[in-house]
Amino acid sequence: MQSQAIKFASARANLFQESVIREMSRLAAQHKAVNLAQGLPDFPCPPELKEAVTRATLDNVNQYAITWGDKFLRQAIAEKAARFNGIKADPETDITVCCGATEAMVATMMALVDPQEEVIVFEPFYENYGPDAILSGAVPRYVRMNPPDWSFDEQELARAFNDKTRAIIINTPHNPTGKVFSREELNVIAGLCQKWGVLALTDEIYEHILYDGREHISIASLPGMEDLSVTINSLSKTYSVTGWRVGWAIARPELTLPIRKVHDFLTVGAPAPLQRAGVTAVNMPQSYYDELKREYEERRRYMLETLEQIGIEYYMPQGAYYAFCDISKFGHKNDLAFTKYLVKDIGVAVVPGGSFFGADNPLKHKYVRFCFSRQDETLKAARARLQDLKPL
Ligand code: PLP
């Protein structure tokens, strides 16, 4: 019999499901599968970051930081944003340090979007944006990106903007497709944002994981977008510290003020010693970013070679660390059936593509996502197991 406690789940919480990605990681553990599901590195973070955390706690940085972020970290973030993103940010008024990009995005939406206002989301999308919209009362309005290059139709995008549109979410480099938005595409979006007075909320956490010489562009650096952008980033992916939970939002003071208020009452602040250690991360020399890119190029090469060997069709990732693949020719009923078979019978966990789409996209069940932010041994073990994969 079901416990009577069931009736207490709020209508809001009932509007979304538990994360499919974490569910896949649980199944991976249960079946002792090689886990290529969740987007986290299985290799250690740089040793200097481990030392920096220890140093911070020994230096007694163990109490609440200023709610909107450790002063030294905000300073370092401002310098990095100027150097890499062409964004001028005043650390005193324009930066809010949060518990990861996750909190930065939801705090931003709760602070800047009113219930019933529309938020445009490119589809497929990182699965958190759906619940983020629900938690802030916003109505997501999906605009499709189309394979094979995941470009969007400019007319369709233009039609999505209306008097109720408050914001558009951009994620570049993109999870799950690996698309990197071009300057031309961002100019189109920027033009529409300015025409309609709409905010661009941009999730740029894969900005340093780029392939084939691609360039990362922050929409906030385009003319006229300084007042209309919230640029979200995090330590998680660039420095391989997803468990630290340190991210940030950069925006004009008028936007930052409400974000800081929401952030304060949601979490007070991100962990203080990890924020201080974040200064060492954000100040890494250029050679660190070059090496990161080189290592990910090699991981991508190996992953794609594996997919070619077993005949899985993939879309060439331009950035981030995922291979989004079309599995229709394997003969399974849908993406979920394929991933369950893969985790139980082949011993490799991946994410069913349906979790990156809204309810009624006909492409929803054709794809799965392989994550390749893994050490060599893990990628080798996955390759060995995947040799047994055959169409039904
Ligand atoms: N944004 C995107 C696009 C992601 O892929 C992820 C994690 O996979 C996150 C945000 C989460 O970032 P954080 O760890 O900083 O909360």
Image (cartoon, grey):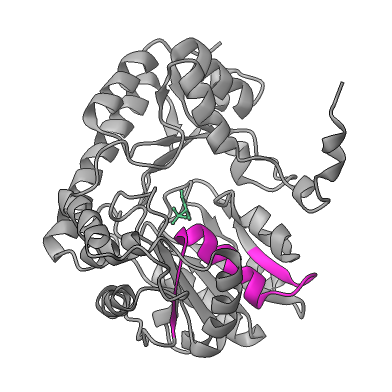
Q: Position of residue 93 (x, y in %)?
A: 44, 87
Whether residue 154 is visible, yes or no, is no
Q: Magenta segment range?
A: 94-120
Q: Is residue 161 above or below residue 104?
A: below
**Residue at the location (44% across, 84% down)?**
94
**Residue at the location (45% across, 13% down)?**
346
Q: Is residue 149 left or right of residue 357?
A: left
- Based on the displayed image, in which of its 4 quarters is residue 361 positioned? top right
Whether residue 29 is visible, yes or no, is yes
Q: Is residue 151 left or right of residue 333?
A: left
Q: Quadrant of the C terminus?
A: top right
Q: Is residue 97 left or right of residue 260?
A: left
Q: Is residue 92 above or below residue 302?
A: below
In the image shown, does 61 or 136 lie closer to the viewer?
61
Q: Position of residue 106 (x, y in %)?
A: 59, 63
Q: Is residue 355 above or below residue 386?
A: below
In the image shown, does 232 or 55 lie closer to the viewer?
55
Q: Is residue 43 above or below residue 379?
A: below
**Residue at the location (14% across, 65% down)?**
285
Q: Is residue 65 left or right of residue 161?
A: left
Q: Position of residue 24 (x, y in %)?
A: 53, 29
On whether residue 270 falls in the magenta region, the answer is no
On whether residue 114 falls in the magenta region, the answer is yes
- Based on the displayed image, in which of its 4 quarters is residue 296 positioned? top left
